[in-house]
Amino acid sequence: MQPMDLRGLNPAPVTAFNRDGSLDMEANVRIAKWLASFDEVKSLVILGHAGEGTFLTTDERLELIRAYKDAVDIPIIAGITGEGTKVAAEESKRSLDAGATGALVYPNHGWLRFGFQKGAPQDRYKAIYEEGGLQTILFQYPDATKATYDLDTQLEIAAQPGCVATKNGVRNMKRWYTEIPALKKAQPDLQVLSCHDEWLLPTMFDVDGLLVGYGNIAPELLIDLIAAGKAQDYPRARKIHEQLLPVTQTVYHRGSHMEGTVALKIGLRHRGLLDHATIREPLKDLGEAAEREIEASFDAAGIGRVDLAMAAE
C-alpha cells in the first residue's frame, strides 16, 4: 500500500444540487477542478458533514465519487457513515469500486448518544480497510460527544494497517496537547490533520495539514496558514487568522455547526462557484439577513470572486 500524502490542505467540498434538489454534476465538477488546481491541495474529502453525505442515496453517493474521480488527479476520500461494521465495510467496498482511495471513518452514530463498547471502533476501522479496501483516517470527534475516543483507542486504531492519518476535532486543547504528542510518538508516520474550522490557530503548529470544510471557501488563505504553521511563524499565522476571522464568525460561529454547511454554499455562491445555495432537508435556509452578513464578511476578508477561466487552465 502506498499511503496517501495528505500533508497540506484537504478540503471537504459541499455537494451542489440543482434547484429541484437533484445532483448538479456540472457544479460539483467545477468545484472539484477548482480546488484541485491548487498544488497544495492533496485530496478531496466528500460525503461528509459539509457534503451532506448522509442526505444522499447510495446511488447518488457513488455517482459523486465517480464524477470526482474522473475530474481530478488527486485522491478522493469518501466519508463512511454506515452504522453497522458490516454495513460500513460494504459501503467502503462500493466506494473503492467507484474510485475512492481513502475513507474518513465516521463513528457509529448511535455512539453519539450511548457511547461505544471497548474494541468496537477498532473493529470498524479494521473491517473498512481489510474488507472494504480503503485507507482509513482516524476521525476524532469533539470532546463534548460520547463518540470521542480515549487515547488508548486512538493509539490502537492508529497502529492498524491501512490507517494513514488522523482528523482530530477534539476541541479540547488540554486533550490536544496531551494526545497529539502521544500519537506522534507511537506512530511517527501518522499524518495529523486538524479540523477545528471555528478556531484553527491554536492547532496550526502541531499538524501536517488540514481536513476542513473551510477549505471550500478560502483555500488560498488556508494554504498560507498551513505554511505559516509549519514554519512556526506565529505572527504570520496570527495575521492570516485575523484576516479570516470575519468569515470564521459568520460561517462557523453560529447556533449550530450544521448551519456551517448552509453558510459554505452561500460563500461559494458569493465567490461565483455556485449559482445558488440549494440544500437538502433537514438543513434550513439561514434567511436573507444572514446571507448578507456572510457575503459582507467575505468582502471584509478580501476574499473575492474566482476567475473560473484561470482555475480551469
Image (tube, helix red, strand yellow):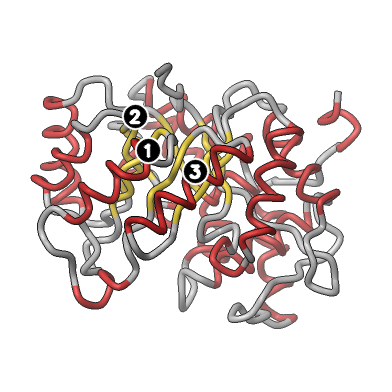
Q: Upstream in the sequence, badge 2 or badge 1? A: 1
Which residue is labeled 1 in the image? 136
Residue 311 image position (x, y, % from top left): 81, 31
- At 57% across and 66% down in the image, what residue appears? 250
Within 10 Å of the Cα at label 3, are there few (<14), some (14-19), or many (20+) other Cα atoms? some
Q: Which residue is mark 3?
A: 93
Give how far apart the Cα atoms at labels 2 and 1 are: 6 Å
Residue 156's tag is: none
Q: Which of these two is toward me, 101 or 178? A: 101
Residue 271 appears left or right of 205? right
Q: Are marks 2 and 1 in contact (CB under 8 Å)?
A: yes
Secondary structure type for disc 2: strand
Give the vertical position of 197 relative to 3 (above or below): below
Residue type at mark 3 is Lys
Would you name the residue on which mark 2 appears? 164
Q: Amino acid at mark 1?
A: Thr
